[in-house]
Image (cartoon, grey):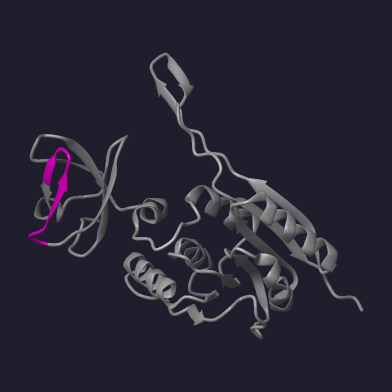
Amino acid sequence: MPFKEGELVVFADHRVQLLQRLTPGERLNTYWGYIEHDEVLGLEPGSVVNTSEGKKLYVFYPTLSNYIIKMPRKSGIIYPKDLGIIMMWADVRPGDRVLVGGVGSGALLLAVLRQVGPTGKVVAYDIRQDMLDCAVENIKAYFGGLPPYLELKLGDIYETTGESGFDRVLLDVPEPWRAAKTADDALIPGGILCSYLPSIMQVRTFATVLQKGGTFGLIETVEVMLRGWHIKGRAVRPQHRMVGHTGFLTFARKLNDQE
């Protein structure tokens, strides 16, 4: 399908990815010269375009990973390598009801919203209005509007929220152990709790609270490393740089109250 006015595209080669919204009369300025947006309108995804200095770039619709890496931020984000594991290990599915604590710049919300789809429901809390506003703008820019199955609340996930009936609870807050009661109340039996934390000492505190609480089981923590490989002809080797530590992911299952 040809590119149209107002659509997000990514100009890329093996070294660079440049995100743009196509606007008639606008241009993308790069280290290698510029590209007129008008030259891209009507092209098919996967086309090659030349900058004014002759640099060749491919143009595609951006993947969600492309968008998250390049979108505006007011905070650190959960990176795509961790988001993929969260979606799989927390088993976030179409139609799920998901409670999110801490919206940040919206990276986690974008992944969850695309995963649950319009048959699901996402409720997200943050204590900062500016973070909610940033997330809203990034979500609107990606989806073309605010999905109706998203509900954003200015509030403290550490406090009793009254939320219940959720399949998953995902926490991106500095002290998730303070939200353990909220998660316990919100999750259905068998539901999954996930927390993202940068420090192993935070993880230890969180895991200890869950272990002592007795309402969660199968508690486990993982760290995701991502290493690219250089493959050209007979030269096969790991890339010199890799994406190492970004955060720790802790998962737990809500136990059934049999009393």
Q: Residue furthest bottom?
A: 162
Determine which quarter of the picture holds residue 219.
bottom right
Q: Is residue 198 above or below residue 130?
A: above
Q: Is residue 70 above or below residue 192?
A: above
Left or right, 221 with reference to 212: left
Q: Is residue 105 above or below residue 164?
A: above
Q: Is residue 95 visible?
A: no
Span colored in magenta: 24-34
Q: Is residue 189 visible?
A: yes
Across the whole image, how many numbered discs are drawn on residues?
A: 0
Left or right, 16 with reference to 230: left
Nearest the viewer among 139 and 207 is 207
Q: Residue furthest right?
A: 259
- Measured as percent of width and height from the top left, residue 140 is found at 35, 71
Determine which quarter of the picture holds residue 71.
bottom left
| Magenta residue check for 82 | no
Residue drawn 21% across and 50% down?
Answer: 44
Image quadrant occupied by the C terminus: bottom right
Nearest the viewer among 235 and 201 is 201
Q: Residue furthest front?
A: 201
Left or right, 19 with reference to 127: left
Determine which quarter of the picture holds residue 171.
bottom right
- Measured as percent of width and height from the top left, residue 38 is found at 9, 55
- Measured as percent of width and height from the top left, residue 1 is found at 25, 56
Nearest the viewer among 12 and 172 is 172
| Magenta residue check for 29 | yes
Nearest the viewer among 123 and 74 is 74
Residue drawn 73% across and 75% down?
Answer: 181
- Measured as percent of width and height from the top left, residue 67 is found at 36, 55
